[in-house]
Amino acid sequence: MATGNPLYANPKLCKHLADYKLRHALSCYKSLQNCLKTTPNGRTSIYRSETKITRCCSCNGYQGRFLLCLICSSISCSSHALLHAQSENGHDVAVDIERSELYCCLCSDQVYDPDFDKVVVSKIMMDMPNNTHVDDGIRRSSKRRKLNSLMDLDLKKSKHLVLMRDRREKSCYPLGLRGLNNLGSTCFMNSVLQALLYAPPFRNYFLSGRHDRETCRKRSSDRLCLACNIDVIFSAVYSGDRTPYSPAQFLYSWWQHSANLASYEQQDAHEFFISVLDGIHEREGNGRIPTKDNGDCQCIAHRVFSGMLRSDVTCMTCGFTSTTYDPCLDISLNMNTNNLSSIDVANKSVRPNENSTRCTLSACLDLFTRPEKLGSDQKLYCQNCKEKRDSFKQMSVRRLPLVLSLHIKRFEHSAVRRMSRKIDWHLQFPFSLDMTSYLSSSIVRSRFGNRIFTFESNEADTSPEFEIFAVITHSGMLESGHYVTYLRLRNQWYKCDDAWITEVDEAIVRASQCYMIFYVQKMLYYKANEDWSCTPMSSRKDPFFPIAGCC
C-alpha cells in the first residue's frame, strides 16, 4: 500500500490528549524538554535528583512506575495516577518518568503523539557528543536545526541516532528485534505481534514471499487484506532498521476486520490473537474451517497454529462413549490451585521464593485432561440407554500444531456474584515441554488400563516435544494493565515492552505473570536458531530452511 494513503495516517489522539493539546498546544511539551536527559545508552528519561527519592504524591510510595503530570508536575505512581486526574480537572495527561512516554491517566495506558516524539528527538540531538560517528551531512543538518527551530526536526534523520544508540547498547541484536510504538492503549497488539514475528513457521512463510502483497487479489476496496498488512510489518522489522516501528496500517486493517473491537480502549491480548488468526483465515482459507472430516485448512494461520482436540463423553450407567473432535488455535487452561495453601489463596499471589507449593503448567494440563463429571443440568442423551444419563467428560489432544499456544485463564467473571477479578498466582512453566502425556492415545490407554488401542496416524505426524520461544505477560489490575512479551532467541531472552527492547535473564521470565505461552516443535526451534539473524538480508528472499507442510 502507498504510504501516502490517508487511511494509514497515525491513529487519532485519545480524547483526553486531544483536549489537552487544544488547550495548551505544545507549550508544556517545550517546557518539559528542559527536564529531559539522555542516558549513555541513548534512552531519554525525566531528570531526577540523585540524592532525593522519587515518591508518589498520594501514597508516598517510592517503588514502581512513576508519572509526571504535565499540568502541575506532581508525581503519581501508576496506581494513583487515575485518582490524581479525577481530583484535578484537566490533569489527564502525564509522562512516564523512566521512559519519557506520554500516558493518559483516564485511559490508564500509554498514548502516542508524534509532536511529543519530535521534542524528545530534538533533546537527543542537543545532547549528542561532538565525536559521535554520524556522517558529516547529518551533523551539519542537525547544527542548522539547532540554530533555527528544533521543533521542525525531520524525524527521518532520527534513525541515524537510533542506529548509533544500538551500536553503543548492543553490537549485534538479532535481526528483526524492533520495538513497536504504543499508538494509544495498544500494548495488547504489540505483545501479540512480537510473538507472531518470531514464530518460526509463521515467520518463514512471510519472509520467503509466500504471501505477496503486491499481487494479492483478495483485497477489496472497503476491506484490507490482514495478511498483506502483516507482510508489511515483517518487511519493516526485518529491514535492519532499529527505530521503533508504528504499526498504524495494521491497526486500521484489524479494525476493518473486527469492527466490534475498533476503539482506543485496552483489549484482551488473547482475544486479539484469535481475531488476527481468524482474519488471516477469512482471506486465505475461503471461510473453510478445519474439521476431522474435511481435512486441514491450508491458510497459514491454521497450518501453523491449528491442532485438534478430542472430547470423550462417557455414560456412567452403561459405559457408552461418544467422541467428538474440534479444531483449536490454542488451548485455554484453568489454573490448578488445589495444591496451594489457604494462605496462598487469600493472598492471591505466590512468588517463586515464597512457598514450595506453586501452581505449575503441568498441573494445569493435568486439570485440562482430567475426567470431569457433568452436572445434573448437563445430562446428555446416551445412544445406548436411549435416555439422558449422568456422564463424565474427558478432553485430550488429538493432533498437536507446529506452534502450541497456551492461554492461562487469569480473568474470572462471575455472573452470580456480579463481579470480575484477576487471578495473579505465580505459574511455573518449563522451557522444554513434552506433550506425550496429554495426547489422546496416552489418555485413552491410561483410562482403560494401558490396553493396546489402534489410533489413526495423525499423532505420529508431529513431535510431542516443544521448546518455548515467547511469553506474553500481563501486569496490573483487571481494569487496567500492561502487556509485555519475552522472546527467546538463541537461548537469550529479550523483553519487548512496546518501543523498548532489552536483554533479560531467564529468572525474570520465570518470575513473570505469564498470560500466553508459545511453544514450537523442538526440531523447528533449533533450526530457527541457527546463526543467521545478525547477517543483513533482504526480506523478500528466502533466508530460511523449508518447513514441510508450511512453506
Image (cartoon, helix red, strand yellow):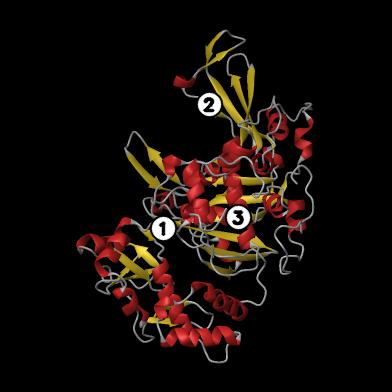
Residue 355: where, in percent of width, then height? Answer: 50, 58
Tell me which amino acid carries mark 2. Lys
Please give the name of the residue rendered at 70% of the width and 60% of the height, measured from the top-left corner: 539
Residue 167: where, in percent of width, then height? Answer: 62, 79
Q: Is residue 80 visible?
A: no
Q: Is residue 531 visible?
A: yes
Q: Is residue 64 above or below residue 233?
A: below
Where, by quadrant of the figure, is residue 366 drawn? Answer: top right
Q: Secondary structure at mark 3?
A: helix
Q: Nearer the viewer, residue 28 or 341?
A: 28
Q: Secondary structure at mark 1?
A: loop
Q: Nearer the viewer, residue 184 or 269?
A: 184
Q: Is residue 523 above or below residue 93?
A: above
Residue 436: where, in percent of width, then height? Answer: 72, 41
> Relative to residue 166, is residue 295 drawn left or right?
right
Of the numbered discs in the image, which one, if any, rests on residue 184? 1
What residue does disc 3 label?
Answer: 232
Label 3 vs 2, first from the N-terminus: 3
Task: Find the distance from the CA under tag 3 to the CA under tag 1.
Answer: 21 Å
Q: Nearer the viewer, residue 196 or 402?
A: 196
Residue 473: where, in percent of width, then height? Answer: 51, 56
